[in-house]
Amino acid sequence: MKAIVFKKYGDPNVLQMAEVEKPLPKSDEILVKIYATSVTAEDPKMRSFDHPPLLKVPVGLMFGFRKPKQPVLGIEFSGVVEAIGDKVKSYQINDKVFGYTGLSFGAYAEYKCLPESALMHLKPQNLPFTEAATMVNGPLSALAYLKKKGKIEKGHQVLIYGASGSVGTAAVQLAKYFGAHVTGVCSTKNLALVKSIGANEVIDYTRENFADTEKRYDIVFDTVGKTSMKECMSLLTPKGKYLLTEFGLRHMLAAIYTSLFRRKKVVIASSNFYWKKDNLIFLKQLAEQGHYKPVVDRCFELADIAEAHTYVASGRKVGNVAVVVCGDEHEGRVGSLMKAVAHI
C-alpha cells in the first residue's frame, strides 16, 4: 500500500511517498481503507521535532530523539471498513467511519488497523469524507475545553480568540449550540466566516484591541496561545475562566494558584485526556442535525502532503486542511473555504 513516511526530522521534504506492507487486522481489530485524513497544527511540529522546551523530553522519549519511531504521521481519518477480526461486534464491512488513531498515528496511508475500542464511530451521513476526517482534533478539543473545563452554560458570555482556526471554528459553533453569546476574535479576512458560523459579534484584532472594553466574559478561550494572561484575566466575570490550549510554565503556575486561591481561574489541560467515543457520537449527531459544519480551507492529494504541511506551518490556514488519500464521492482534487462556508 502507499503511505507517506519520514525517516528523519526536518522540513516538509522529509515526507516521502513509499510502498509499505498492508496491515492485517487481529481478532479484535478493524482494517480501515482511509479515504481522507488531515494536517493538524501539531503535525508539522511532530515532523520537525519542534516542541516547547517542557515537551521536548517526554515527546522525545515517546517518539524518538534522533529519528521518529513512528514513520507514518496522521491522527484524524475517515474511510470504509474493509475487513474485521473475528471478535469484532460493533462494525461491519463497508461501514463508513471517522476517528482518531491516537499515539499510533498512521493515517497518512491507504490502510490502518485499529482496535474495535478505538476512538472511532460511524461517520455523519451528510458529510463527505474530507469533512468527516476533520471532525476529531479541533471539535473534540473545543468540546473538552468548553464543556468539561469551562462549564459553559446557556447565557454565558464567551470570547473566542483565534476564532477562525481549527479549534476556534469548532468552539464558535459549539458555544453557540450551548446557548452562549459568542464574541469571536480574528483577522479582517475571516470576519465574515466567523460571523457565518454563529458568532454574535466579531472583533478584528488587526484594527482594535479586544481587551479595550468594559464588557466581561464568563469564558475567555484562547485557542492559539497568543493572548496576554493579564489582559484576559481582567476581562473575566468574578467566577470566569481563562482557557488556554497552549501554555508555558507561568501559565501552569497560574493555573495552580488560581485553582487554590482565586475565583477567576486560569485553566490549562491536555484536552485529549477527555476525549471519549460518546463525544464523537455527540458531534456526529450535531453534524447530521445541522448544528455543526466542519470548515475546510483546502484539500490536498496525499502525494502533495509536503505542500499541505508547508501551508499549515505558515499559519495562514482557516479551519482545517484535509488530505484526500483515496479519492471518492466526486470530492475533487482541491476543496475551497467558500464551499465549506456555503453549507454552514
Image (cartoon, grey):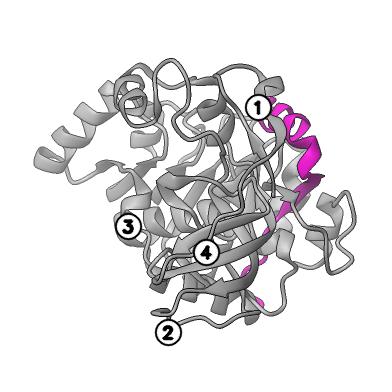
Find the distance from the CA under tag 2 to the CA under tag 4: 32 Å
The residue at which mark 3 appears reads as 274
Q: Amino acid at mark 1?
A: Ala
Q: Position of residue 130 (x, y in %)?
A: 73, 59
Left or right, 9 with reference to 155: right
Dot 3 or dot 2: first in sequence order is 2
Q: Position of residue 211 (x, y in %)?
A: 49, 33
Q: Residues within 10 Å of mark 2 (few under 14, many from 20)?
A: few
Total marks in image: 4
Taking 228 as reference, is 287 above or below it?
A: below
Quarter location, residue 190: top right
Find the distance from the CA under tag 3 to the CA under tag 2: 25 Å
- Residue 44 highlighted magenta (yes or no): no
Residue 51, numbered circle: none
The residue at which mark 4 appears reads as 174
Taking 88 as reference, is 303 above or below it?
A: above
The residue at which mark 2 appears reads as 89
Taking 154 as reference, is 313 above or below it?
A: above
Find the distance from the CA under tag 3 to the CA under tag 4: 16 Å
- Farthest residue to the left: give it: 260
Q: Are marks 3 and 4 in contact (CB under 8 Å)?
A: no
Dot 2 or dot 4: first in sequence order is 2
The residue at which mark 1 appears reads as 313
Q: Position of residue 295 (x, y in %)?
A: 70, 55
Dot 3 or dot 1: first in sequence order is 3
Q: Is residue 131 visible?
A: yes
Q: Which residues are magenta?
A: 289-314
- Mark 1 or 4, closer to the camera: 1
Q: Are marks 3 and 2 in contact (CB under 8 Å)?
A: no
Callout 2: helix, strand or loop? loop
- Mark 2 or 4, closer to the camera: 2
